[in-house]
Amino acid sequence: MQPFFAQRFEQVEPSFIREILKVATRPEIISFAGGLPNPHLFPVKELEAACHAVLSEQGAAALQYATTEGFAPLRQFIADRYQKLYGMQVDPDLILITSGSQQALDLLGKVLVNEGQDLIIEEPGYLGAIQAFSVYQPTFRPVTLQEDGLDLAAFDALLAAGTSARMFYGVPNFQNPSGVSYSAENRRAIAERLQQHDLLMIEDDPYGELRFEGELLDPIAKLAPNNTVLLGSFSKTVVPAFRLGWMVVPEWLHKKVTIAKQATDLHSNAFSQQILHRYLTSHSLDEHLQQIKEVYGRQRAAMEAALERHMPASVRWTRPEGGMFLWLTLPAHISAMALFDEAIKEKVAFVPGAPFYVRPEIQNTLRLSFSCVDEATIEEGVQRLARAMQRML
Ligand SMILES: Cc1ncc(COP(=O)(O)O)c(C=O)c1O
């Protein structure tokens, strides 16, 4: 038959990163492209035991349909963790378990975004958020990220100029793609503006617990709880395959997002919620995270050292204190897309920065991921990248 599509889906682009990964996963290529957590750190044996325990103790009950809000003991665990980490009071009844934080983005788009309405987003921004929100056809209004967080002058200028935006999306810890974190001061300033302008922030935080340097900083949700939806995820702290994340919503939003979740999938995988909860309560998450942070911290240090050694003086990069990514800015005349082709000839891959912008004109940035590459391979990969770059300079 003649293909046909809903209008709202005509403009939605395929994930460019998935296309890149097809090239980057060839075995001869050193890949800094993927944004994957390191599989050597997955607690496989522990999850096997947890799975066995849930099935043998709960039997058929573990396999039944369950509530839309999510497994209550898991929601309680999340609330307790906010208390422990930040001294933050979170009502477990305002936590909704989602199928990864990616689903939270979709549900929030569904419930809160009108076609043509402004949506404020950091620039560069998380590609998965741009894609998820695009389905609901907002007009993206980008605000630049700086070394210490959001460019407040640009944020103020946008708000002063008048905007139909009711929402702002940002990733305050070790942002994907840039590795940038918002400083404590930046967070306070944003919280004030959310309240002053009656804006809702979608505070997406899958990396906050992967801090290998510096001090934990309070979520913006602690400072302005009625003006934030705080998203979390077990993808980077335990495993992504369970597809388990959550959102902490203000009370006024809870009923509507629950209905949206019900309409979308009834509930997230109830079996994996129980296995995860079993794992979390029979092992120390802190000890597990310590291992992840040690490995990522070492690899980040190796990448920084290799960049110092091999990159031309005209290249700049961010210094993330956690997470999985580091962001390079090339001289303005060099296109990271063109560099990608040269780099593939040298058998090294990265993600060009352009797709992370909602304005197409910025071409000279790129993302490097250090989570899955050991230190010796990082050194070799950065040397290869430097060779490709030299040819273009
Ligand atoms: C900033 C950000 N948000 C959300 C996600 C989605 O994570 P998940 O759906 O696995 O929880 C990712 C994954 O890379 C991410 O980087």
Image: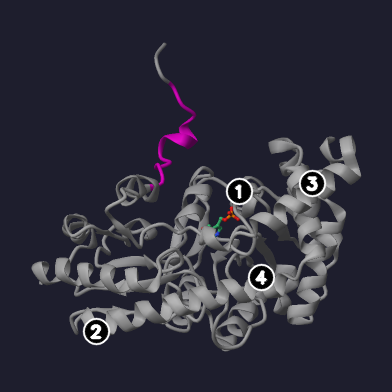
Q: Which residue is labeled 3 in the image?
A: 52
Task: Give amino acid for label 4.
Answer: His
Q: Tell me residue 308's x, y (percent).
A: 27, 84
Q: Residue, x 61% and y 48% (percent of image)? A: 241
> Can you tell which mark lies on residue 309?
2
- Give residue 64's quadrant in the image: top right
Query: First in sequence: mark 4 or mark 3?
Result: 3
Q: Pointer 4 and pointer 2: residues touching (CB < 8 Å)? A: no
Residue 288: mark in rendering: 4
Amino acid at circle 3: His
Secondary structure under tag 1 reads: loop
Residue at image x 75%, y 71%?
284
Identified by mark 2, the residue type is Arg
Q: Give the range drawn in magenta.
A: 4-15
Q: Which of marks 2 and 1 is nearer the N terminus?
A: 1
Instruction: Find residue 241 and name its label.
Output: 1
* Amino acid beneath label 1: Ala
In depth, the one of 393 and 254 nearer the eye is 393
At x 40%, y 40%, the residue is 11
On the image, which quarter does residue 201 sit in?
bottom right
Q: Give coordinates of residue 304: x percent, y percent.
A: 35, 81
Q: Earlier in the sequence, mark 2 or mark 3?
A: 3
